[in-house]
Every structure is written in structure tokens, then in C-alpha cells.
Amino acid sequence: MKKAFTTILTFIIAIIGLTMTGCGDNGEMISIPDVTMGSEFEITLNAHGGTAYRWSYDISSLGVEYVSMDFVPQNDDVSWTGGGQVVYKFKAINEGDYKIKFKLSIPWESEPPIELKTYKIKVVAG
């Protein structure tokens, strides 16, 4: 009985910790190597399959545009849910410095995101 209580308490503390990481946190800042105008580049994030959490993004301006998004499963078992990665593909269309901000949250809830990542991109002439 004591072991079950300890397990439940540990789980609750972990959930609270995950929830608080999005509160007032600017998140992680990642720089991408220079991208040539007209070329495509990818950003890969951990998926949270089997949960309601989804990545969404916001691009700072019109210098970069969304192309596609693919899910790459962690293993080949199609009945297995969870894990894997989400691969976003973007195209550099104008020279300049840009940011793409990703947030991991449950889309239909107003709770703060549990994870934030900002990617800095410098688009250069070819």
C-alpha cells in the first residue's frame, strides 16, 4: 500500500513539474545554420503520440514558409502508439533573420504550453 502511494505521489509531482515548465519560461533557443534562399530545411521535434499534446508554430514574418509535416514512428509496429518524431519542413523565401516558435500544448485547453522552443534562422542569398 505504501509503495502504491509513493508511486502515485511521484506521478503527481512529475505532472506538476511538466505543467510548470511552460509557465513564464521563454523556452529553449536553437540556432539553425544559415539557410540559402529558395532552399528547404527541416525542424525535428519529439512527438507525444498517445497523448493530447500537439506542437504548433508561429513564424515571425514572411521570409520562411511552411511546406509540410510528417510523423516518423519510433518503431515499425503500426499498432504501437507513442514516441516518434514530428518533422516540419519549411522553405526559405527571403533573405533576413527569422524565428519560428514552437509550443507543445493541448490545442483546445487554455493551459500554458509544457514546452517552448524557438528556432533562429538566417536566410542568405545563394
Image (cartoon, helix red, strand yellow):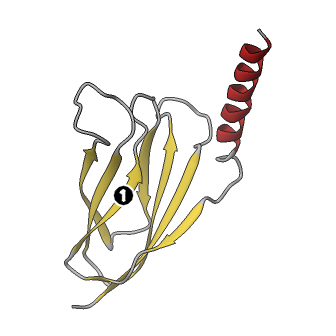
The residue at 45%/29% (across/down) is 51
The residue at 35%/43% (across/down) is 84
Quarter of the rendering containing residue 77 = top left
Residue at the far bottom in the pictured view: 126
Q: Secondary structure at mark 1?
A: strand
Residue assigned mark 1: 44
Query: Which quadrant is home to the N terminus?
Result: top right
The spot of residue 36 in percent (x, y) is 26, 84
Quarter of the rendering containing residue 2 = top right
The spot of residue 73 in percent (x, y) is 28, 41
The residue at 73%/28% (across/down) is 10
Residue closest to the eye, 46 or 27: 46
The residue at 43%/45% (across/down) is 55
Query: Which quadrant is home to the C terminus?
Result: bottom left
Q: Amino acid at mark 1?
A: Thr
How many circles with numbers are drawn on the protein? 1
Please indicate whether residue 25 sits to the left or right of residue 74 in the image.
right
Please indicate whether residue 76 sits to the left or right of residue 84 in the image.
left
Please indicate whether residue 33 sits to the left or right of residue 112 in the image.
left
Whether residue 55 is situated above or below residue 58 in the rendered picture: above
Residue closest to the eye, 61 or 21: 21
Residue at the far right in the pictured view: 2
Whether residue 67 is situated above or below residue 122 in the rendered picture: above
Residue closest to the eye, 66 or 115: 115
| Label 1 CA crowd tier, 10 Å (few <14, some 14–19, many 20+) | some
The spot of residue 6 in percent (x, y) is 77, 21
Quarter of the rendering containing residue 32 = bottom left
